[in-house]
Image (cartoon, grey):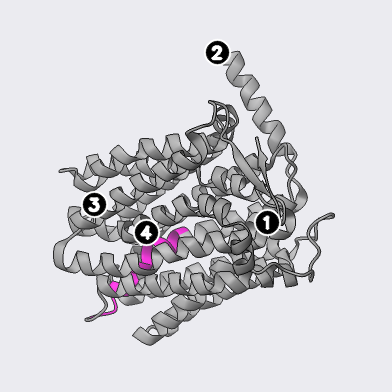
Amino acid sequence: MFERLWQGLLAYADKLRHFQPNARLYLANIVIAGAAFGIFRLLFNFYVLSLGEGYDEALLGQLVMVSSLASMIGAFPAGYLSDRIGRKASLVLSSATVSASVLALVFWHTRPALYLLNAVIGLAQSLGGVSSGPFLMENSGEKERTYLFSFNAGLQTLASSVGNVVGGLLPAWLGGALGVAATSSAAYGVAIAVVGGVSILALLPLVLLKRAPGTYQVGGAPLSPFQYLVQHPGMLLKLIGPQLVISVGAGLLMPFMNVFFRKTYQQADATIGTLFALGSLTMGIGLIVAPPLADRWGKTRFVVITQALSIPFLVLLGFAPWFWLSAVAYLVRVALMNMSNPIYSTFVMEQVESRARATVASLSNMSWSVGWLISPWISGQLQVHYGFAPVYAGTISTYVIGIFLMWLFFVRKSGPRAAKAERITGPSVQLKR
């Protein structure tokens, strides 16, 4: 048993050694940015709620909706822009814009400013999201590709866990230094400023990136997402449809997890930050161990199995009578539901030729943004009037439907090793086994 485990570790290490220099620089960026935004994701909702009367859960839902709308709108031109100016320039522009917008939140936090800055962040994140998948494809070989996608997500999540711990403690530290309460807008505002400063440091590895040989030619004729959708409606529906349904449920709940633990179980920032850190840690471990399992079971089969196993824990998370039980369910659920994300991203990128990757990535990002467009606003209204019970019911229902569609499209007729998949190669559609 130990010999088999050792051989497995050696094989895994061999995959990591094949990571190219650009991939290593990108991972360095992910570590720094992941830590910064682990803090941001924990504290931003609390920052908004601390700003005074009228800054409530309904506003939080509206802000997420605005950001998602901007991401959806930006997904179409983002694919064009990524192909026009190149992956490096796109990643740098995205990261710099997000950093500047986060810093602006500290000094400009009226309601119109919050809407505007969240929209800018959504646009910038859309460009980064559209560019990251093609960038990883262009800077990896078939041997280590799945491992790079998963290691990228795993490192980001582990870095986020560090940010969650720091974020839970940062308002108290800064509040003490400023002579204000840890839950005051001043303490939260300075903490957000720290996030902006750290995220600027994450730009350095991106600036050092070099164009990989043999990548898609910058400035070539980009593909129209609308045109590509018309050419390949069936396969794109299969690739994007299940994630669209799941995104509807995620938009109902995920932006409000910190609010859920505070309102339902009256937990302090430090406790929630520690829980989120543990969640990021378990998810990061899951992401790192995912590639060998995906190699064994097949990518789409692995996605369906892990996400389906997360559903009972999602139910327990929302309706447990004690905080400790809900917390344990949260840790298990977040690992199972998310460990397959980079595996599926790899699968999607493998289905399309290089010149179409940014286009398909933009369509995929757009579908996720569509799901988050209305859901957070609905969730905010539900929370204000009815609490979290209907929110959980909606999330559970959409997750079950999305996972079933994934099984139906890719797993139902496949063998135990891998699902059948079509490969889009231009005007024609071929089967890839």
User: Mark 2 belongs to which amino acid?
Assistant: Met
> x and y percent of residue 152 in the render?
60, 48
Query: In the image, 35: left or right of 310?
Result: right
Disc 3 target residue: 393
> Image quarter for residue 134?
bottom right
User: Mark 3 belongs to which amino acid?
Assistant: Ala
Task: Please say if 302 is above or below 30.
Answer: above
Numbered tag placed on residue 172 in the rendering: none
| Comes first in the chain, label 3 or label 2 | 2
Label 2 to label 4, Cα distance in Å?
A: 43 Å
| Comes first in the chain, label 1 or label 2 | 2
Query: In the image, 361: left or right of 270?
Result: right
> Looking at the image, which residue is at 55% across and 53% down?
234
Q: Helix, strand or loop at disc 1?
A: helix
Label 4 to label 3, Cα distance in Å?
A: 12 Å
Image quarter in which the C terminus is found: top right
Label 3 to label 2, Cα distance in Å?
A: 43 Å
* Residues under numbered marks 3 and 1 in contact, where contact means CB atoms less than 8 Å apart: no
The magenta segment is: 38-52
Q: Helix, strand or loop at disc 3?
A: helix
Disc 4 target residue: 248
Residue 77 visible? The answer is: yes
> x and y percent of residue 304 in the render?
45, 38
Numbered tag placed on residue 1 in the rendering: 2
| Comes first in the chain, label 2 or label 4 | 2
Mark 2 burial class by Cα count in 10 Å: few <14, some 14-19, many 20+? few
User: Mark 4 belongs to which amino acid?
Assistant: Val
Q: Helix, strand or loop at disc 4?
A: helix
User: Mark 1 belongs to which amino acid?
Assistant: Pro
Disc 1 target residue: 134
